[in-house]
Amino acid sequence: MKEFQGRRRWYSPVVIVILLGLGVLLGRAVWRLYGAERVATARLERLVADWKKLAKREEFLTVKLAALSTARGIEEVIREKFAVVRSGEKVVNIVGDEPTTTPLATDETWWQKVVSFFQSKTEERD
């Protein structure tokens, strides 16, 4: 009988309330840690993406800098930026094959289609 009374202490309402309170406190702590982990993971992903962009930019700038270290590279940049030529050379601007004018669009809205339908019906009767 004493064993039953010892077990009964664990099932008393006071012990159950205390255990539930501890469970809630631990649950809140775990939830906060989970939220902090999600924020840290998102921040890490953003930083890795930024780092990859910067690495690509560094590679691009390194290639450009290497091109500028030669006389040919400097000449190309000057010709591109300022449209200059050496004496005896001529500049030729090539225009693409695209047409300079575009045809007008004759698309009607649905309301214009309805109005034109009824106008054509009234003109047929007259």
Image: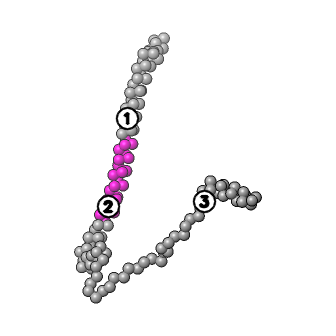
For label 1, the residue is: 32
Q: Give the image location of residue 106, x and y in percent.
A: 59, 64
The residues colored magenta run 37-59
Residue that appears at 76% across and 58% down: 125
The quarter holding residue 116 reads bottom right
Q: Residues within 10 Å of mark 3 (few under 14, many from 20)?
A: few
Residue that appears at 30% across and 86% down: 89
**What's the CA distance linking mark 1 and mark 3?**
58 Å
Q: Is residue 53 magenta?
A: yes
For label 3, the residue is: 108
Badge 1 or badge 2: first in the primary sequence: 1
Q: Residues within 10 Å of mark 2 (few under 14, many from 20)?
A: few
Q: Nearer the viewer, residue 40 or 70?
A: 70
For label 2, the residue is: 55
The quarter holding residue 26 reads top left
Q: Give the image location of residue 24, x and y in percent.
A: 41, 27
Q: Give the image location of residue 44, x and y in percent.
A: 35, 49
